[in-house]
Image: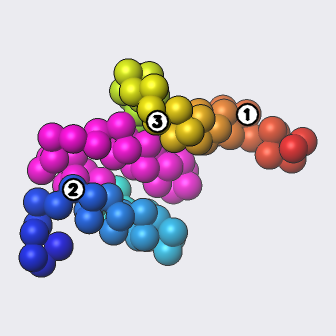
Amino acid sequence: MDLNPANVRAWINQGVTFREMGLYDLAVENFDIAGIIGNSLHERIYAERGRAYHLRGDWNCAVADYQNALELLALQPNLINYQQKVQSWLDELLDPSKNFLD
């Protein structure tokens, strides 16, 4: 990112890394920056930020981001696998008992 601070993929990847480390606030900040500087990959930004909100416990923000991501993903049939992943995250949030039944 030092070489190209406008690289949206780098901001998203760093956000995912922060999220995996449990640094949810930093992850959300990275996704916010990616959304501001980028004019592409918004479906991924919404989905990954939604997951960070979800894991942080901000369920209303997570649902909103998941829904935004799914709306954008519906326009891109080539990303059906990613759409299914986001839908599973939303389902997990809305019905946590599914995790115990599977």
Q: Which residue is mark 3?
A: 79
Three-letter code, disc 3: Leu
Three-letter code, disc 1: Asp
Q: Is residue 41 magenta?
A: yes
**Image disc number at residue 3:** none
Q: Can residue 37 be seen from the camera position used here?
A: yes
Tell me the residue at 45%/26% (across/down): 77
Q: Which residues are magenta?
A: 31-58
- Helix, strand or loop at mark 3: helix
Q: Which residue is mark 1?
A: 95
Judged by its main secondary structure, the magenta piece is: helix
Tell me the residue at 66%/33% (across/down): 91
| Residue 4 versus residue 61 in the image, above or below | below
Q: Pinpoint residue 48: horizontal percent, then vertical percent.
A: 43, 50
Q: Which residue is mark 2?
A: 8
Q: Earlier in the sequence, mark 1 or mark 3?
A: 3
Quote the CA–CA distance across marks 1 and 3: 24 Å
Quadrant holding the C terminus: top right
Which dot, 2 or 3, sits closer to the camera? 3
Three-letter code, disc 2: Val
Tell me the residue at 38%/21% (across/down): 75
- Helix, strand or loop at mark 1: loop
Q: Earlier in the sequence, mark 2 or mark 1?
A: 2
- Helix, strand or loop at mark 2: helix
Q: Earlier in the sequence, mark 2 or mark 3?
A: 2
Tell me the residue at 51%/69% (across/down): 20
